[in-house]
Amino acid sequence: MKKTALITGASSGFGHACAKLFALNGFNLVLVARRENRLKALAAELKAGTQVHTISLDLRDSAACLKAFEAIPESFKDIDVLINNAGLALGQEPAYRTQIDDWQTMVDTNISALLRVTRYFLPSMVERNSGHIVNIASIAGSWPYPGGNTYGATKAFVQQFTRGLKADLLGTNIRVSEISPGMAETEFSQVRYKQDDHKAAQVYQGTQPLTAEDIADIVYWTTSVPKHVNINSVEVMPVCQAWGPFAVHREQQ
């Protein structure tokens, strides 16, 4: 019997790449994203024989989520792998100049939506004593940088929530993993800089960043190890990226 994976943020980037890889490996898919046209295009690209159910909605809308999840066809109801991938960064201004609405959007998307999706599908996994939750975090959750304030804080939440889930699920066969990518070239920077292509391109100039396919490979690997193995956390950066020295401000003498 085919397994089913539900992927949020499936219309681009990591989610898009995960959908293609999981389809190649025999999964049926529930794909969730805001852009319906992209979901339909992705569904058409997938390996022949893959059964796909698409859900177009904004995960920040709790009522819409409940309605859509309740309407998932019976053949897709038992989610074997939940990939909480939907997330974003907005802006890179210092905290005292940022737009408060950007902060709220990041909290609502990166934290509240992830909680909402997890809480809906987790009881069924517990009842079946089977399943795997993979949460996409970021190195920003562990290593702060100027302008990463709220984005980094939301990803630190994802890391700690993943650990808490693992603690709560002790004694079950449910696995929980967290993947923290570093610099990866997707639509991430275009979203962060609000479609300023020049700023987005500068992020990757002169580098060989991670790709969406790199992260999809890692996500799939965490789900394919033997059932008694739980990959708790994976932090991954491109070779061209590393941690910086401590920053010290010195007064002019």
Image (spheres, rainbow, N blue to C red):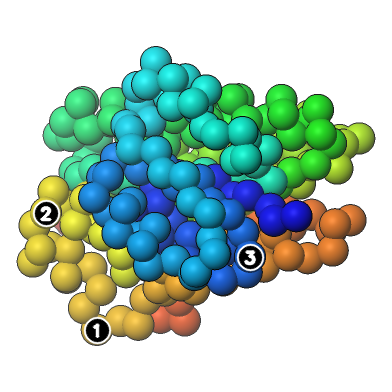
**Quadrant showing the N terminus:** bottom right
Amino acid under label 2? Answer: Gln
* Quadrant of the frame with the C terminus: bottom left
Give the labeled residue for mark 3.
Answer: 26
CA–CA distance in space, label 3 to label 2: 35 Å
Q: Nearer the viewer, mark 1 or mark 3?
A: 3
What amino acid is found at the position of numbered circle 3 in the picture?
Answer: Gly
Identify the element where label 2 is drawn: loop
Q: Which mark is residue 232?
A: none
Instruction: Classify mark 1: residues with Cα within 10 Å, few (<14), some (14-19) or many (20+).
Output: few
Q: Quadrant of residue 14?
A: bottom left
> In which image quadrant can residue 227 be found?
bottom right
Q: Nearer the viewer, residue 41 or 152?
A: 41
Of marks 1 and 2, which one's residue comes earlier in the chain?
Answer: 2
Which residue has dot 1 on it?
Answer: 206
Q: Is residue 208 above or below residue 129?
A: below
Asked which secondary structure carries label 3, the reply is loop
Q: Residue at x 67, y 68 (%)?
A: 221
Residue 135 lies left or right of residue 12; in this view the side is right
Q: What residue is shown with label 2?
A: 195
Whole-percent x and y of residue 68? 43, 26
Q: Are marks 3 and 2 in contact (CB under 8 Å)?
A: no
Question: How dense is the environment of label 2, judged by Cα within 10 Å: few (below 14), some, or many (20 and up)?
Answer: few
User: Mark 1 vs mark 3: which is more N-terminal?
Assistant: 3
Q: Amino acid at mark 1?
A: Gly
Query: As rendered, which of 133 and 136 lies closer to the eye?
Result: 133
Vertical position of residue 223 compared to residue 101: above or below: below
Cβ atoms at labels 1 and 2 below 8 Å apart? no
